[in-house]
Amino acid sequence: MKCSTVFAMVATVALAQAAVLPRQANSQTFTGALGGVSATPVLDSGNADRPFAVKGDTFVNVAAALQRSCDQQNNACMNLVNGGQADFEGADCQDQKQQCDAAA
């Protein structure tokens, strides 16, 4: 068997395996973390019908999951402000949410 044929077969197998392996990486790319609060990770749910998960909630598409992730970050940020634990204001949390939404 020719070397190029073997490489082609290996590449085909690798692509097939990648198609069925769950997404282990976080799909949330926004890295802002005002007050040390990062956006909630968007991970593979293991459910073929609702493949994206954010803190146990599952979603059909990544856009909805990213939206939830940004919303959860905003809520946690506002909790810091409302609890008097922040050296920033609620408007700063809203600005961060807009940035998170834009990154999605």
Image (spheres, grey):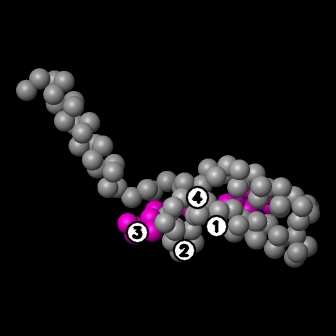
Classify mark 2: helix, strand or loop. Answer: strand
Instruction: Point out the tag, 1 or 4, that comes first from the N-terminus.
Output: 4
Instruction: State how far apart marks 1 and 4 are (Cα).
Output: 9 Å
Would you place residue 100 above or below residue 75 in this image?
Answer: above
Q: Which residue is mark 2?
A: 57
> What secondary structure is marked by label 1?
helix
Residue type, numbered disc 3:
Asp
Give the structural element (helix, strand or loop) at label 4: helix
Marks 4 and 1: in contact by CB < 8 Å? no
Where does label 1 land, which residue? Answer: 68
Residue 41: quarter of image = bottom right
Q: Nearer the viewer, residue 13 or 51?
A: 51
Question: Disc 3 marks which residue?
Answer: 49
Q: Is residue 98 above or below residue 2?
A: below
- Compare residues 34 and 16 and report the one nearer the observer: 16
Position of residue 46 measured from the top left corner of the image (x, y, whole percent): 40, 67
Would residue 32 be visible to someone looking at this image?
no
Estimate the spatial distance between the alpha carbons at disc 2 and disc 3, rounded to whole Å: 13 Å
Q: Alpha carbon of mark 3 to alpha carbon of mark 1: how far?
A: 18 Å
> Is 85 drawn above or below residue 63 in the view shown?
below
Image quadrant assignment for residue 5? top left
Considering only order in the chain, which callout, 1 or 2, is on the residue closer to the N terminus?
2
Q: Amino acid at mark 4?
A: Ala
CB-based contact (under 8 Å), mark 2 and mark 1: yes
Q: Which is nearer the N-term, disc 4 or disc 2?
A: 2
The crowd level at tag 4 (other Cα within 10 Å; few <14, some 14-19, many 20+) is some
Give the mark, 2 or 3, whose residue is nearer the N terminus: 3
Instruction: Identify the magenta region.
Output: 31-51
Q: Nearer the viewer, mark 1 or mark 4?
A: 4
Badge 1: few (under 14), some or many (20 or more) residues near its Cα, within 10 Å?
many
